[in-house]
Image (cartoon, rainbow, N blue to C red):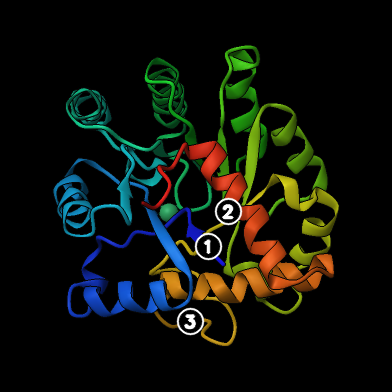
Amino acid sequence: MQLIDTHTHFYLPEFDNDRDEVVERAIDNHVVKLLMPNIDIYSVDAMIAVENRYSGICYSMIGLHPTSVKKDYLEQLDKMEEKASQHPYIAIGEIGIDLYWDKTFIKEQIIAFKRQILLGLNYKLPVVIHSRDSFPVVFEALKEFEDSGIKGVFHAFTGDVEWAEKAIMMGFKIGIGGIVTFKNSGLDAVVKKIGIEHIILETDSPYLAPAPYRGKRNESAYITIINKKLAEIFNIEIEEAASKTFDNSVELFKIPANE
Ligand SMILES: [Zn+2]
């Protein structure tokens, strides 16, 4: 059995004291690849260092997170584009629109989102979308890319079936994480309707730990908990759930196979 954590901020200081052990626990739990979304220009060096240390396991993305879109965002985007030309990345991410934390820079968030989608299309890379309290704005922005061949994932998806179907129609996968294990999240019913062929797994660690670790530091090994929940929802064996989401992830991100 092989699993992939398609979204972990594993380069953050939360893992500085025990990074080797976290990777060991991931491998022990069949989590063989860790995909790392970037946050801003200041997180790139730490991310690349982790990718180099765990080469063949950890893969980096490049992008400016919507909550990091501030006054200096054009400067940040210039630097992102420069970085994108200097190193191979597995995706553009994470990008998108977040109106939950702060609406001050909504215009700038939309501009940054579209510019980074173009970057993804340029490099033929999937885009990893963060959408919080913002589906109408995100889909409005996506309209002009309808026939562009855009591919990607709506990460940490918590919307309803209608939004999921819109995303899938446009060429996106649905990223499911710890929230699906929370009682009363209602996400299990949505996941069942979405269908496993459109789903990939993620932790978003160190955030959003699944039950029974809710509120604690999350880590990639817990993908196994999310996979188990998925198997329950679809009433299939955990090996079958793992193999389906593994294939979905490899196809989307073109992840190199293990030698
Ligand atoms: Zn994230």
Type of amino acid under label 1: Leu
Q: Of the residues under marks 2 and 3, which one precedes in the sequence?
A: 3
Q: What kind of element bears circle 1?
A: strand
- The vertical placement of 23 against 50, above or below, is below
- Residue at x-position 14% and y-position 53%: 49
Q: CA distance from mark 2 to mark 1?
A: 6 Å
Query: Does dot 3 land on a helix, a strand or a loop?
Result: loop
User: Mark 3 or mark 1: which is in front?
Assistant: 1
Image quarter for ligand 1 equals bottom left
Q: To which residue does mark 3 refer?
A: 215
Pointer 1 residue:
3
Q: Please determine whether, in this image, residue 227 is positioned above or below residue 150.
A: below
Q: Quadrant where the N terminus lies?
A: bottom right
Labelled pair 2, 1 in contact (Cβ < 8 Å): yes
Q: Is residue 49 above or below residue 138?
A: below
Which residue type does callout 2 highlight? Answer: Phe
Q: Secondary structure at mark 2?
A: helix
- Give the left or right position of residue 166, taking residue 51 as reference: right
Number of the label disc, if any, that sits on residue 90 = none
Question: Along the line of sight, which residue is nearer the eye, 116 or 31?
Answer: 31
> Is residue 89 left or right of 179 when viewed as pictured?
left
| Residue at 26% in and 43% down | 40
Amino acid type of the residue that numbered disc 3 sits on in the rendered structure: Gly
Image location (x, y in percent) of residue 259: 36, 51
Q: In this rendering, which labeled residue sits more in front, label 2 or label 3? A: 2
Distance from Cα at disc 2 to Cα at disc 3: 27 Å
Residue 207: x and y in percent read 43, 68
Neighbour tally class for label 1: few under 14, some 14-19, many 20 plus, Cα within 10 Å: many
User: Residue 186 versus residue 244: which sits nearer the camera?
Assistant: 244
Q: Residues within 10 Å of mark 2 (few under 14, many from 20)?
A: many
- Residue at mark 2: 246
